[in-house]
Amino acid sequence: MYVKRQRGWEIPERLATPESVYFNRRQILAASGLGLAAAALPRPGRAAETDPTADLYPAPRNSKYTIERPVTPESINTTYNNFYEFGTQKDIWEAAEALPIRPWEVKIDGLVEKEITTDFDTLIRRMPLEERLYRHRCVEAWSMTVPWTGFPVSELVKYANPLGDAQYLRMETFMMPDVATGQKQIWYPWPYVEGITMAEANNELAFMVTGAYGKPVAKSMGAPIRIHLPWKYGFKSIKSIVRFTFTDERPVSFWEELGPSEYGFWANVNPEVAHPRWSQATERDLATNERIPTRLYNGYTEYVADLYTGMEDQRLFM
Ligand SMILES: Nc1nc2c(c(=O)[nH]1)N[C@H]1C(S)=C(S)[C@@H](COP(=O)(O)O)O[C@H]1N2
Ligand SMILES: [Mo]
């Protein structure tokens, strides 16, 4: 049976979002612990108990990235998602449970010393895992606070040995239309692609995520490996990555290809630059359900402003 373990960083129950707002009836039953019938219902992240990397969690918390907001309850984070491969609504977590995450091959190619194809379970054991609390701001004006586990993207870059002329890191999600039926919607430019500059990849905030809430990351949140770039809008943080390509050509991302006037390459958070169809001045914090002001670079200016000096001619904020 599912027993909720209270961890140090979890917030007092009274600060949590009212469950009725987010949970469908079935989940309310499961959460209320009404005996065996409820306990037998599926829930996201269940496979974590048999995950071959489970022994790596929880990883030590890096207290440098501890922040002021309450952590979003795991039950919200694993069931309120954007993962278009499994549908365009927020409640894709059950569909995402069908994603086979073992074996999981990761390819590193392009402008590198030598192409690498590696098994995720081998890759992760070469990396220094730590836990970081990060804010996550979706372009749709909702936000979460997540205890991620993972390693700096700079460690992946080091491992990949890119050549001197590599300027961008391009990332690609799996392509499995039979499992992820959203990928049968051919008007979307599958597979999901994202890209960042080498300077962004080597920024200390750029984080490869393998876990959350002290265990392997849930499928709905991008298992077994996704990125998190906390100063950018959430769509830049691509999930369930199978390929990293170092290139001298700026990648065109999934959303940029769909709507270049609404979703650009940089997509840095800025409350003063509105989305063409709505304001970005405030956001709804899913942990408290309160509307709070959005901050420049999502509150990470001191870490990232240097990346963009002298680039004022670019559309840095959309
Ligand atoms: N492959 C893939 N990655 C993706 C998305 C997606 O649809 N497919 N959605 C993005 C968007 S818009 C957001 S806000 C975050 C959501 O991450 P979360 O569901 O873990 O909160 O994932 C991003 N990464
Ligand atoms: Mo998003």
Image: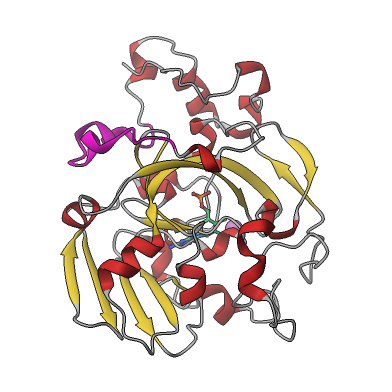
Tell me: residue 289, above or below residue 247. above
Which range of residues does the magenta coloring cover?
A: 43-61
Give the x, y percent position of residue 34.
44, 10
Report the front residue among 10 and 76. 10
- Tell me which residue sits at (79%, 72%) in the image: 276
Residue 57 magenta = yes
Tell me: residue 240, above or below residue 4. below
Report the front residue among 158 and 188. 158
Quarter residue 261 falls in: bottom right
Residue 213 magenta = no
Tell me: residue 96, above or below residue 161. above
Q: Left or right: where does residue 268 sit relative to residue 36?
A: right
- Tell me which residue sits at (46%, 48%) in the image: 92
- In the picture, which quadrant includes the C terminus? bottom right
Res 22 visible: yes
Give the x, y percent position of residue 107.
24, 71
Res 175 visible: no
Q: Residue furthest top?
A: 35
Colour convention:
secondary structure
Report the front residue among 182 and 206. 206
Q: Left or right: where does residue 130 sit relative to residue 110?
A: right
Give the x, y percent position of residue 273.
80, 68
Give the x, y percent position of residue 12.
61, 18
Rendering quadrant holding ligand 2 = bottom right
